[in-house]
Amino acid sequence: VSIDFGGDLPALESRNSCIAFLQQVRSQATSLSVKTYDRKTVLAPDKRRATMTLTIGAVVKYAGETRKEFREVRIEWAKKEHDWLIREAAVVQTIRPPPFSTVE
């Protein structure tokens, strides 16, 4: 399993690193809200793999500050026996608009 959130967040390469990251977030955050938007799943012809793209929005409150993050994510799934397992998850790099500026 590999999860790369992008930005200044560490890439998570194992189940243990995911658990450690989530425990750190829980210990520092006073509030966390996560929502998903625009989910799209494409099933491979072999019906044993699938790719999902979605937007994840999170609002985190910690140390008196509120931080909002929205990321587009690609998740690769693999079917093992009767269960679907995440094989890889990564942030999709998007083009950001330039900062607002006035033209004189």
Image (spheres, helix red, strand yellow):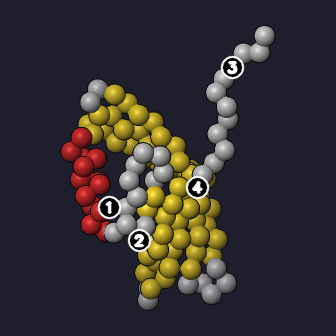
Q: Give the label on residue 64, or none.
A: none
Q: Does residue 72 show up?
A: yes
- Place residue 31 in its image quadrant: top left
Q: Earlier in the sequence, mark 3 or mark 4?
A: 4
Q: Mark 4: which amino acid?
A: Val
The N terminus appears in which quarter of the rendering?
bottom left
- Place residue 17 in its image quadrant: bottom left
Judging by the rendered image, the residue that carries numbered circle 3 is 101
Residue at 32% x, 61% y: name it: 18
Image height of 102 relative to 8, above or below: above
Q: CB of mark 1 within 8 Å of CB of mark 2?
A: yes
* Residue at the top extreme, as displayed: 104
Q: Position of residue 97 (x, y in %)?
A: 67, 35
Q: Earlier in the sequence, mark 1 or mark 4?
A: 1
Q: Secondary structure at mark 3?
A: loop
Residue at 29% x, 26% y: name it: 64
Judging by the rendered image, the residue that carries numbered circle 1 is 18
Q: Earlier in the sequence, mark 2 or mark 4?
A: 2
Image height of 85 relative to 71, above or below: below
Q: Mark 3: which amino acid?
A: Ser
Judging by the rendered image, the residue that carries numbered circle 2 is 1
Q: Within 10 Å of the Cα at label 3, are there few (<14), some (14-19), or many (20+) other Cα atoms?
A: few
Q: CA distance from mark 1 to mark 2?
A: 9 Å
Q: Position of residue 78 (x, y in %)?
A: 50, 79
Q: Earlier in the sequence, mark 1 or mark 2?
A: 2
Judging by the rendered image, the residue that carries numbered circle 4 is 92
Q: Mark 1: which amino acid?
A: Cys
Q: CA distance from mark 3 to mark 1?
A: 40 Å
Classify residue 32 as left or right of residue 78.
left
Q: Secondary structure at mark 4?
A: loop
